[in-house]
Image (spheres, helix red, strand yellow):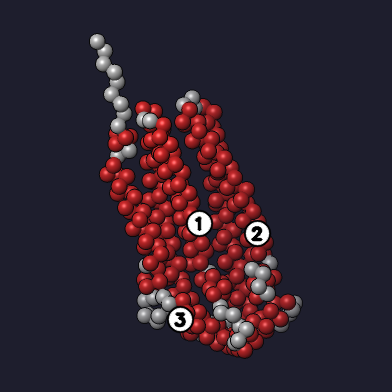
Amino acid sequence: MVGSAAPVRFDTIVPGRVLGALTALVLVLAAALVLTPPPLADTGNRGFADQDTLRQALRDGFVAYWNSGGSTRPPALTSVIDYWFRFHVVKGVIAVLLLVTLVALAALLWKAYLRAGGLGAGQQSALATAGAVVSMFAFGALLVAIANIQGAVAPFSSLLPMLPSGANDPQLTTACDQIRQQLTESTGATPTVDDMVRDFARYHVTMAVIAAILAITALGLSAVSWSRFVRSADTRSRRLLCASGIVTALLSPASLVLLAANTSAAMNSATALSAFFDGSW
């Protein structure tokens, strides 16, 4: 008499210890991403971890920088920029670690889904859902990492949106008005404006380079997914490869749009900076 095959156990498909370790690491890194960058970046204990203190210090440093008329940034502004650079470095490193961990967790779940033929429909759906959710979080971590790379390369331009409103600040209002005026004139820009324009160009060049890398990578992944889809005979594999091919195919043109927009802004950085001070950036 031939006995019936033993049902497949979930823990043989998904190693519990590895799953638990990766999940715990994701939670720790996610908490670190939110909580640790401000205090770790504030090495001089200047209180920049507090947003109000940071914005006030930025305002004071920016006004002093503009009134100097030169390209050398005064210590009051340099200290804020240095803090913002360290903030982005810390946050970027944590975001990359979180991204790597999420990719490893997503790979574990998707591999388990491909081996889940002996599991019930509910468990298979749970694996697919978990894999999709973790993949979306991985994409979010990628965006956070990209934003912080850009911020670390050009921390001054990254700080500009944090300038407080100049409505009730005559000094800041005057500085912004004079900057707008010089940016719209063809000649007569001070070294201060030239320095700001160069930094703004670097800010957008950084994103343009990242967007180009993303577009090429997404296009390559899409081609690989569709190639394997054509050769695969397994239903679950074909579903996964089809989804991967569609998502990466959509990511490529989105990256190209980002590339075009930032390339244009970098090539016309004075116009882009003027749009920022007009409230359009």
> Which residue does the numbered mark 3 point to in the structure image?
53
Question: Looking at the image, which residue is at 55% across and 87% down?
Answer: 64
Q: Separation of disc 3 and disc 2 at Cα?
A: 33 Å
Classify residue 127 by image quadrant. Answer: top left
Q: Is residue 208 above or below residue 107?
A: below
Q: Residue 105, position in %: x, y?
A: 38, 46
Residue corresponding to mark 2? 261
* Label 3: how many Cα within 10 Å (few below 14, some 14–19, many 20+): few
Of mark 2 and mark 1, the one earlier in the sequence is 1
Q: Residue at x 32, y 38 (%)?
A: 14
Q: Amino acid at mark 1?
A: Leu
According to the picture, the residue beneath numbered tag 1 turns out to be 143
Residue 48 in the figure: left or right of residue 263: left
Residue 258 in the image: above or below residue 155 = above
Nearest the viewer among 30 and 210 is: 30
Quarter of the picture containing the C terminus is bottom right
Question: Where residue 152 appears, x then y in whole percent?
Answer: 48, 67
Q: Residue at x 55, y 51 (%)?
A: 214
Report the residue that reaches farthest toward the front: 122
Q: Earlier in the sequence, mark 3 or mark 1?
A: 3
Could you give the CA–CA distance between mark 3 and mark 1, rounded to whole angstroms? 27 Å
Q: Secondary structure at mark 1?
A: helix
How many numbered marks have been drawn onto this rendered protein structure?
3
Q: Nearer the viewer, mark 3 or mark 2?
A: 3
Q: Is residue 228 visible?
A: no
